[in-house]
Structure formats: structure tokens, C-alpha cells
Amino acid sequence: MKLFKDKLNQRIEKFNTLLCIGLDSDKSKLPSSFTSQFKFNKAIIGKTHDLVCAYKPNTAFYEAQGVQGIKELKLTCDYLRENYPDIVIILDAKRADIGNTSESYAKFAFDYLGADAVTLHPYLGKDALQPFLDRKEKGSIVLCKTSNPGAKEIQNLKINSKPLYQILAKKIAGKWNENNNCGLVVGATYPAELAIVRKIAPNMPFLIPGVGAQGGELDKSVGSGVDKNGKNAIINVARSIIFASKGRDFAEISRRETEKLKLEINKYRNG
Amino acid sequence: MKLFKDKLNQRIEKFNTLLCIGLDSDKSKLPSSFTSQFKFNKAIIGKTHDLVCAYKPNTAFYEAQGVQGIKELKLTCDYLRENYPDIVIILDAKRADIGNTSESYAKFAFDYLGADAVTLHPYLGKDALQPFLDRKEKGSIVLCKTSNPGAKEIQNLKINSKPLYQILAKKIAGKWNENNNCGLVVGATYPAELAIVRKIAPNMPFLIPGVGAQGGELDKSVGSGVDKNGKNAIINVARSIIFASKGRDFAEISRRETEKLKLEINKYRNG
């Protein structure tokens, strides 16, 4: 059995990249020659696979297309596992329900789609997430500090003078992580808070969205997000890579953007 | 345009029932003659529709079956809307993501499945849920105090001596409810806390799970959960009704359980 974090860090090391491409393949935004989200993803993957540690399809953009969308998502995950088994698949599903129900969500993410990790909401507490946490070889990446402008409304409420997201980070890095399979979502749009969370959880994989279209600063978020070995950080970029162009050369342009970003990330990572 | 809460309360009044059946149709638990979740749901609906105000399919049990499961869920929602347009459909999906992603989830719940309301996680804050809240005629039912044993781990953390779930209830009943389309999930397993939330949000629809298999006390939770007119409360029961029997007579037995429960609820509801 290989832990999620080992698979991730081996990939990071071998390909020298922290970059994750978010396959947020909103059907209405695809180049006009595409009707299949899977075929679009395949084109992006074909041009970028050697530059990334992970791909992260967000379920919302597939669900919006109903049955057909779930087919496209399944095809995408199957294609990745069959052709690039060393690349991490993170299902960005942001699920969480009471225990017997979370069990069914875990089946969807891990057994049906074969993802390596899934993103989760913390609000119900550890017992609700237990069916995910019990999957020792799979990653449970819990929302800690999200990248949206209004994240502070709930996440920065103070409990004994500490913001909720810090209390949560401590819980997740502690008791929730008994199988050494938890991770945290911490937005690049809040680099100072990212640095604080990294201190609380020095060895845990962080999924860091918010770079690119959302405007997170790359230098600060990479510098604050990596662990002491420059690893355990997954820098996710979606729209600014996959929709970099709508022209016939969209996949080449995506590769160019991905290369540029990979180099830039490594500059901040190593300095 | 009819508000979600008006559709709900009209149904409650006309059929004199607060009962909602949770269509948690876990495929592994269906009577052996069924391979289709939709056909099973249809049998349950056929025998119980005059006794309920709402049906609540939980997406997890359909997603676990992949593409076929989403088909079964869609067939179920379509069947309900076509045959029983006055019955409320609550999609128990517990979604929430940043704004542009929540928009896609809203499409799945409201446009694709045609649900009247959806359940949502609060952790990302109001701005993330805006695409749901902007659907004026649809219900946004936000998790407040959930029914699981470990709900208190996060939900009862104290902010200036008030537990988080109360702070949230106040926010949701206030600013989040500008379109008068919010509701709250408050578990029947915590009747004292349900009474407190009802004081904070006197006029809001409450979805109250946890009766039946989860052991919530019916008398206290109905008494504390209804508004001052004995309405705006949706008492959800799933497993103890839909899986009351695995025999050939399962639908009749489900009806018998539903009738019993409806009468019992109304006893506590009316004093």
C-alpha cells in the first residue's frame, strides 16, 4: 500500500513540479470544435502530463451536464489511470455527509472513479468523514481556508482568540490524521494565513487553489505553502491554463502557459 | 413565482403532513427483486405520496452507482415533477464551492433535476453560495446543527460564548436570507438545540433529519421544530420507512409505517 502523500511526493520529485491542472471543463467554455468534455481533457492532458504532479477535475462542471457529464468524468479518470498511473487524481467534490452517506460518496470517488484523493467539507466533524479517513491509501483533503473573497465570514470567526480555520487545521493535522492520509485546502489568495497553517501542519499535503484567474500571488503562496523540503504542496491552476485560448492551438497554448507557470513556481520553491 | 417556503407550506396544509421521505435508495439494500433504484422509488412513492409534504433523494446513494445512478436519480425527479407537482423535491446534495463552481452545482440541482431545494454546507460563507441564493424560487437549505453523534466537534465551538451553529443560524436567517429562500438543517437528535435555533429563526423552513434509524425523539423534535403555526418543519425519515421490509409487501409496509409516523407527528405538532 502506498500512501497518497507518498505517491504525490514521488511524482513531485521525479518530474520536479508542484503544478496541478484543474480540469474545470465547463462545457460552455470549451473551444467550439468540442462537444465532449473528455476529448477536451484528453487534448489538455496530452500536452501537459509531463509538467504536472496532479490533475483535479471538479465534479460540479460534469454534474451540470447530468448523466452525460458523469460519463465524461469517468472517461477522464479512467484515461488518466490507464495512461499516467503515477499522476495523482484529485476529485474536487467537496463532499461530506453523516457516516452511512459519506460511505456512498467514498465509493463514488475512490471505487467508481478511482481518484487518489477527494476534497471534503469539515463542518460535520470527524465522525462523519470516517468512511473517507478509513481509506488508508486515499487522500482526504479537508477545506481549511478557502480562496473565495468571503472565506473569512465563517473561517475567521474567533474561538478563544484563534480563528476557526486554525482550530480546524490543528484538529485535522492531529486526531483526524491518524492514518496519515489527510491534506488541507488553503487558498493562494491568503498567503499570510497559508504560512500560519503550514506551521500548524508542517508535514501535510496542501492543495493550494486561487493562483491565476483568482489572483493569488504565486511567490508568496509557493514560498509559504511548501514543506521544509519544498514538497507537499499542490499548486492548482484551472481556468488560466485550460481556457488560455479558444483557438485551434488551444492545447499548445495551454502547454506554453503550463511550462511558464511550472518554471515560475520552481523559482519561488527553491529560493 | 412561488417561493419554496410557500410551496412547502401549502402542501403541508393541504395534506396535513410534515413528513418527508428520504429516498436514500442504497442499491445494496433494495428488495432482491429490484435492480433499478428508480423502480424502487416509484413503488415507494406510489404507496406514500398522499402522506408526505416532500421527498428527499440523497445524491450519494445514486452517485455510488455512477452514470446509471444519476440516470435513476433523474428518472425519480422527473417522475415526481410530472406526477406530483405539488410535492416538494429536496435534493440532499450537501454542496458548496466557490462562486463560479457553485453555479454549476445549482444547474445540476435546479435545471437538470428540477429540485425545489438543495442542502448546502456553510463553511465557505455567503459569497460562495450566492449562485444558489440568487435562485429566488428555489430553497437553499443550509446545514446548521447536523444529526450525527460528532456534530458538536465543530458546530458547538464557542464564539464569544455562543456556539458556532447559533452564530450561523443568525447569519442565515438574516443577511443570507435576503430572497426569503433559505432554510436550515437541524437534527432531531438534538431537540434542545433545535428549540434554540427555532427562536433564532422563527419563520424559516427547517429540514429535520435524524428521526427513525438515527434515534431522534419525535415528540421533542416536532414540538421544538415547528413554527408558531405548526408549519415550516420537514420531518425526514428514510431507512426506517423505505427499508421497513424486504419482502414482496415492502411498499405496503412502508405505507403502514408512513401513516403511523404521520399521525404521531401530527399529535405532537398540534400540542
Image (cartoon, coloured by chain):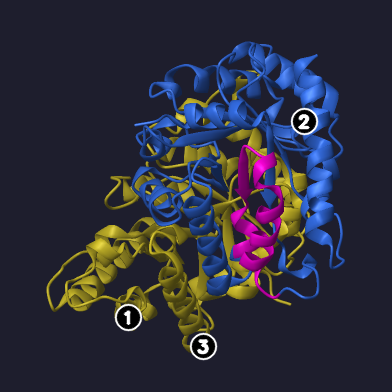
Chain colours: A blue, B yellow
Residue B166 vs residue B173: left or right? left
Callout 1: 10 Å neighbours few (<14), some, many (20+)? some
Membership of B90 in magenta stretch: no
Front tag of 2 and 3: 2
Front tag of 3 and 1: 1
Q: Is residue A57 above or below residue B68?
A: above
Q: Residue at x 76, y 24 (%)?
A: A222
**SS category of the residue bearing label 1:** helix
Residue A212 vs residue B216: left or right? right
Cα gap from disc 3 to disc 1, whole angstroms: 15 Å
Cα gap from disc 2 to disc 3, whole angstroms: 46 Å
Query: Badge 1 sits on which subunit?
Result: B
Q: Amino acid at mark 3?
A: Glu
Residue B23 vs residue A60: left or right? left
Task: Kindly indicate the quadrant of the structure image that contains residue A244.
Answer: bottom right
Numbered label attached to residue B82: 3
Q: Residue at x 73, y 65 (%)?
A: B135
The residue to which callout 2 is attached is: A188
Cα gap from disc 2 to disc 1, whole angstroms: 47 Å
